[in-house]
Amino acid sequence: MSAPRFTLRRGVAAAAALPLLAVALTACGYGSQAKDDTTERTAAEGRKLSADTVRIGYFPNLTHATALVGIQEGLIQKELGGTAIKPQTFNAGPSEIEALNGGSLDIGFIGPSPSVNGYAKSRGGNLRIISGSASGGVKLVVNPDTIKTLDDVKGKRIATPQKGNTQDVAFLNWVSEKGWKVDAESGKGDVSVVRTDNKVTPDAYKSGSIDGAWVPEPTASKLVSEGGKVLLDETSLWPDRKFVITNIIVSRSFLKEHPDVVEAVLRGTVRTNTWIKANPDQAKASANAALKELSGKELKPEVIDPAWKSIQTTDDPLASTLKTQAAYAVGTGLLDKPDLGGIYDLTLLNKVLKAEGRPEASDAGLGAR
């Protein structure tokens, strides 16, 4: 099969190209470098698989709960036996995509927009989505003194995490459906879209420099704890109240060379999600402990409790919603219509699900062909 061809508009090319992105985001505090959250995790007893280590990337966000809990509790490592995990954390999707495309990362937890952009950047040659991880956990939180209805958002300053990221695209699409005009490149228009690092968004809200934010958890609940009000939960905009917020992706070369390692990781993530659902309170505490280890601070109950309830871990990649999100990016002018055929390879996930007595996941017609 020849690799599908893609043409990105300048906006998405900038969002996908790290050197350009770093310049654009320096002023708003975005970190673009990966961080080894620990040294190599101690391998479990058992047979070493075809690789000595597997490098797994993720964000210190609750929407990456599968990674946080699976690594914290050793549930993924257990399936890897003598093959050790080398975890790396990232602050922005493009840096994780660059690590995958550049060969310094093997498997990553990441949002749908960076997944699409990364697939396009490699012309379909380097990356595959191999599983889902989470749904939901995104809200529009506003200052109730200045915004009381959805129509009041017009003329206000609303933060999103990053130009072209999953929440940015969703907000721009929502604005368009309201009939308002915003230039996707500059963020200027009937609404001012202020691209702001999630870490500093609560301070920007407290200072009054933004009127609200369309953000993932736990940032949304942090804003609520500062007096913000949830004006819209993005789940209300989707059929069955489900949409992909986090995928698991893999370097195609690593998948080809070490399918046994990838299968073990997926067995670990599937069993982690099962454990999370069976032990929600213990899992929430585990995720908070992981966040404390990564950032030095745990989330307060008034933040983590509502945030945790709004996120659903899932093995299903919810592929049809990724297709819709890609269409949103096209509609905003950030992306030329891509051919996403081949972006999914769910072979190993479905092998694991079958072994667990579970139904197969669908790639919505976007699998290898």
Image (tube, rainbow, N blue to C red):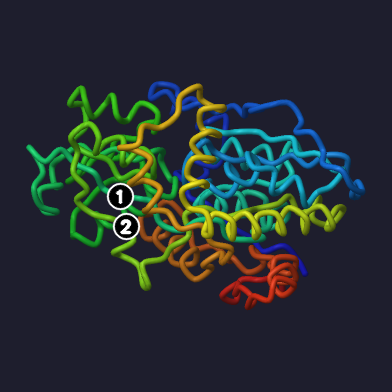
Q: Is residue 239 left or right of residue 326?
A: left
x, y percent for residue 166: 43, 50
Looking at the picture, which amino acid does disc 1 mark?
Lys
Closer-to-camera residue (218/203):
218
Question: Badge 1 local density, few (<14 within 10 Å), some, or many (20+)?
Answer: many
The quarter of the image holding the C terminus is bottom right
**Point 62% across, 29% down: residue:** 34
Q: Which picture quadrant has residue 197?
A: top left
Mark 2 lies on residue: 234
Under circle 1, the secondary element is: strand
Query: Which residue lies at the image location 49% right of the left edge and 67% below the top edge?
Result: 323
Q: Give left or right: position of 98 versus 364.
A: right
Element marked by disc 2: helix
Image quarter in which the N terminus is found: bottom right
User: Which comes before the other along the chain, label 1 or label 2?
Assistant: 1
Q: Closest to the observer: 315 or 34?
A: 315
Residue at (24%, 39%) from the top-left corner?
224
Q: Residues within 10 Å of mark 2 (few under 14, many from 20)?
A: many
Label number found at residue 245: none
Is label 1 in contact with label 2 (beta carbons under 8 Å)?
A: yes
Residue 14 in view:
no
Q: Is residue 294 above or below residue 171?
A: above
Residue at figure coordinates x 84%, y 47% from the top left: 81
Q: Position of residue 20 (x, y in %)?
A: 52, 31
- For label 1, the residue is 139
Q: Quadrant of residue 150?
A: bottom left
Q: Is residue 314 visible?
A: yes
Left-right relation of 149 to 350: left
**Alpha carbons under labels 1 and 2: distance apart:** 6 Å
